Amino acid sequence: MKHHAAGISISRSITTRTRRSGSQTLLAAAAVALAGVSMALSPSRAFAQWSTTYEQFYLPGSSNWQFRHNYPAGDRLFNAFDYGHAILYERLWTEPNAAASLLEEKEYNFITRELLVHPPNLPLEEAAIEVAYAKLAPEAKMMFDWAHLLHRQIYDAWADERLTVPQKDARVQQLIRYYKTRKDLAFSSVPKSMELMEGQPYSLAFRRKYPKFNGLIWAYHWLQIGLYEPLLAGRNKDERQTGVIATVARFRQMIENPPSNMPRLMPMSPAVAPLFTARYPEAAIIFDNLHAMHDVISDILANPALPRGQKRAAIMLAAGRYRDNVSFAMTPQEWMGMAAGMGIANMGGPVRGFLAGFPQPTVERGAVVAHGSMSGMSGATGKAAAGMAGMDHSNMAGMTPSAGAPAQGQAAPAKGMDHSGMDMGSKTNMPGMSAANRDHAAQMTAMHNAMMSDPVIRARVNANPSLKRMMHDMMANMASGAVTTARPSKDATARKAMTTRKPAARSTGTRRATSTSGVAAKKPVKAPAKPVAKKPAPKPDPMAGMDHSKMPMPPKK
């Protein structure tokens, strides 16, 4: 409990000192000086390195510390979160062979039963808690500190009741620009794929060995991005206060029965904080990259297969990838589609409008996001499930094959793959085909439209030029009548649906003999029985035998 006592002692010391006027800046300077002295007096012979990274403080402004003033319950929780992240890295680095119970029981119980119940009044200096880890990777530690500072200053802007909404927007944009001036510390505002977090040789080690503590970290992240929602949605101070209190209460419920109600997938801003994401997409991407790198470092430190002497290099490589704009990059549309496909129920549930009970997750604990196939979500083994098993599409309501635009909150179709204008919904739109060919083409089109209405599948297709070209050529060939297969459908339901559509306008002078209900038209003439003509042998079906439910998607490069 050495670190526990140190953390509480620091909290009490800071609380006493902040009662003096003007102590904020002095405390920050003192913390930097003490951390530097600690690192200078306790060098690590095996992992010593020079670091030119330096700390930087708040951007000056009248809104600073308004969140602390107006929402102290939420602000103090964030101070406790700082301890949770710090002690996690320190334990993983200094006691790599310790039993899982050290984090899963001892540290978890202290954090949830004591620290979160009576959180510190002011932020802790993490270098005083994660002493050894801060020497291992000071650059990564400062990346987290810099991003957490952006978090807090955006809370401050929206907690300042003296600012109008346009003034708050201007302040947030100013804060984002200030954040990005530190290219050595700033996370990229380009989304990163889950492969960077879950597809590396060291990935998944932490969540598998420490499911409770992993769930606690994800619950932290749920609250950190989720608290923006009541601040943005509230029409006045009372509504904002009520929303923040309710969100904090939901977080506390989330950790009561670990890990049952904790997130099973990393909470992502587009799903948990849609209002914030729509208003400040750059900041939302930065925070998702921040939270993903928290997982990456936990995996690097927790994975015994990665030699101890290589852990710093792995952390530095990951940190560089999360700062650059090219490594494992996704488009914003792919990022939003991925968040929607992962399912809000698997991320802890929504922040606003939640019910008394928790949503029912659709994936197993420890599930990962698949990277190289259309399988969507896979189980704890990391292998892709068959077909689309495990993927939650329940929150994609309103996305229909024939719709020209996605439902509200869904990702827009990626440029170059919109076939909504290619009308192949009825046989009469394919004049160059036989009836059997038109049936088959209509079924293929329906399958294509259903698949491409899924933002995750659409994003993966558009990310692969070869596959996108194949899909486009296939649809173009069907539209021009180039499909030559005569293989009719055996699905009675599909057959009935095709024969009950409204007839198209006459173009050849012939009259259709069926009505829109599928019943014979008025005064039908019963044709005499005719001998069945011998049908010519069908041409080979170029797509026969192909199981489209298991069509692999090439991995994104």
Image (cartoon, rainbow, N blue to C red):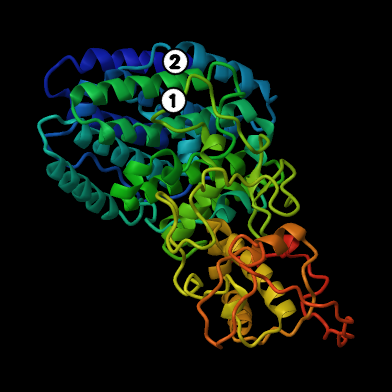
Q: Are marks 1 and 2 in contact (CB under 8 Å)?
A: yes
Amino acid marked by disc 1: Tyr
39 is higher (above) or lower (below) than 397: above
- The residue that mark 1 highlights is 83
The residue drawn where x is 69% and y is 83% is: 483
Real-space CA distance between mark 1 and mark 2, rounded to the nearest whole angstrom? 9 Å
The residue drawn where x is 40% and y is 41% is: 144
433 is higher (above) or lower (below) than 490: below
The residue drawn where x is 27% and y is 34% is: 233
Residue 115's disc is 2
Label 1 element class: helix
- Sequence order check, earlier mark of 1 and 2: 1
Q: Nearer the viewer, residue 52 or 352?
A: 352
Q: Quadrant of residue 75?
A: top left
The quadrant of the picture occupied by the C terminus is bottom right
Q: Is residue 122 visible?
A: no
Q: Is residue 438 left or right of residue 126?
A: right
Could you say where residue 166 lies in the image, as x and y percent from the top left?
A: 14, 45
